[in-house]
Image: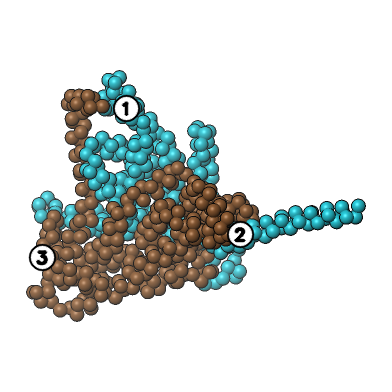
Chain colours: A cyan, B brown
Amino acid sequence: MQEVATNNQKSNKKKHDAHSQKEKRGKKLFLLIVPFVILVLLFSYYPLFGWVYAFFDYQPPIPLNQSPFVGLKWFEMMVQNSTQLHQIGQVLANTFAMSFLNILTSFLPVLFAIGLNEIRNKHFKNLIQTLTTLPNFISWVLVYSIAFAMFSSSGMVNELLRNFNWISEPIKWLDSDSHTWLKMLLWSLWKGLGWGSIMYLAAISGIDPELYEAGRVDGANRLQLIRHITIPALMPTYFVMLMLAVSNFLSNGMDQYFVFQNAFNLQHIQVLDLYVYNVGMGNNSLSLATALSMLKSLVSVVLLFVVNWTSKKTRGESII
Amino acid sequence: MNVIEKKEVTPGERIFQVVNITFFVIFTLICFYPFYYLLINSISANNLSAAGAINLIPRNIHIENYIQVLQLSGIPLAALVSVGRTVIGTLLTVIASAFLGFMFTQQKMWKRKFWYRFVIVTMYFNAGLIPMFITMKNLHLTNTFWVYVLPAIVQPFNIILVKTFIESLPKSLEEAAELDGAGTLTTFWKVILPSCTPILATVAIFTAVGQWNSFQDTLIYITDQRLYSLQYLLYQYINQASSLAAMVKNSTGGALNMGAIATQQTPTSIRMTVSVIVVLPIMFIYPMFQKYFVKGIMLGAVKG
């Protein structure tokens, strides 16, 4: 009896040993990624605690623990103070306008891909593709440098117009507030149109050639082939891109608007991301800026969930 | 197929073809001409360039601009910072992406699923610009080189890419290494890393372009001029024409004679030359690695 018991104990112990050995091994493996987990904690989670600054009147270099707690003051200020309200209204209008214009033109990469696909010469096609996607890989600072070289008062375009005697005074393309939204849209199209079409081009090359063959046998012309075969095949990709654009509705990014902003166009160029920067770093109102970016982050996450839910409902597929 | 190809082209199709090609030729020119314009102006005689006379062909070619610009105070250091952050940042990001992608395929790891989600979910939220700034300040990272590199090391999206890639590799690779008695790290270095090169090349190229082009982090976290990146310096040059002119005068001693007028630096010549220096690496790298870029965006779409 006793022998059996000890034997049982032994095998239990062995099992237990094997188990703890396995767990030990698992923990050892985890130890290897600890440094990276720390990086994630420091740079993705820890900054979230910075949101508490939105509830204080933080004026550096006075540390947070000596700053007065102000509750929802900054949030109330956004809607109560009429000048502030007006300004935020304008900022939101700019943000919505830029996002809306970008969504409105989101079908252009589709057309670009379809058109490019209709070009038969392969080398010519590749050349176009390389040169039109190049602007996507330069920074907005460089785009601005190009804009400056081309469109400043002594830039290439003004010099050319002057040399032809078409104008006497240089046209102010950059230092003015005329058509600011449109100009920003055109610059982002210049930079992104070619690259935006790459995904659709790949989708086109994935279409079964037999579909076109069948279409031709049925007597469809080119335009009909595009309308009834190519475009429907691109719709799923287009839908995903559209959903992503909607979920980024509040995030235009700030680089583009920052480099192009100046005293003249400030009113119509300040999108939310830029406004947060200007308030926080320019005016040194860190607390107000934190309140703003906190609201923005929260709304963005909600948007993402709504969009994802919509996508699941309509297509049975989530985008995240 | 051939029979169909030979079919008569209708007038409507011909018009479409002409309009289509015309559009693409014009748009391609609009995309590329500015780069060409910067390049020819940076190597032409500066007085001609300032008069707006260089639009199509470079004239009186010289490379004096490049020699002088590279001697301007700030530029060599900024170039070093930009190259440094691109090389070190890319290296660390690639290694981290590869390693984490591999580790998250290790079923035995303690609470693997939890930690994987813990890392990946950071893709979908962000604290915002000011909390990030305060964080960097609290961590004493503002005005250090590491602010360019450390926050960018763990990239959830890259980790997903690598993990998916490793999962598509034959399991026998890893098992063989384990049978040979190789530990986790050895397996990673000797077996996994070499077989991941295609995906890592894609990750590397995107990271490198991102690092090289990055501008916002200098703007927000850096006030020490010695840590300015080329992008930031270029931005300052565009906006501070007057101080630039003063700097130019100092660097050339204000000497003006007829022979020097073609090579005398002007704010415009400096701006254009620095722009070309900033864009040149991209222009060389991009056509060479275009297929990796395209692959990258397609992989993104699969996950997207």
Residue at position x 54%, y 56% in the image? B177
Do tag 1 and tag 3 residues touch (Cβ < 8 Å)? no
Secondary element under disc 1, as helix, strand or loop, is helix
Do tag 2 and tag 1 residues touch (Cβ < 8 Å)? no
| N-term-proximal mark, 2 vs 1 | 2
Residue B160 rendering spot, x and y as whole percentages: 50, 50
Q: Are marks 2 and 1 on the same chain?
A: yes
Q: Choose between B156 and B266: the one closer to the eye.
A: B156
* Mark nearer the viewer, 3 or 2: 2
Q: Amino acid at mark 2?
A: Phe
Residue at position x 38%, y 56% in the image? B205
Dot 1 corresponds to which residue?
A212
- Is B253 rendered above or below residue B214? below
Q: Give the Cα distance between marks 3 and 2.
A: 64 Å
Q: Are marks 3 and 2 on the same chain?
A: no
In the displayed orientation, state which residue is furthest to the top: A218
- Give the side of residue A222 with respect to residue B132, left or right: left
Q: Residues within 10 Å of mark 1 (few under 14, many from 20)?
A: some
Residue at position x 37%, y 73% in the image? B225
Secondary element under disc 3, as helix, strand or loop, is loop
Dot 3 corresponds to which residue?
B60
Q: Give the Cα distance between marks 1 and 3.
A: 54 Å
The quadrant where residue B262 appears: bottom left
Residue at position x 27%, y 39% in the image? A116
Residue B3 rendering spot, x and y as whole percentages: 22, 24
In the displayed orientation, state which residue is furthest to the right: A1
The quadrant where residue A281 appears: bottom left
Q: Choose between A60 and B156: the one closer to the eye.
A: B156
Residue A298's disc is: none
Dot 2 corresponds to which residue?
A30
Q: Amino acid at mark 3?
A: Asn
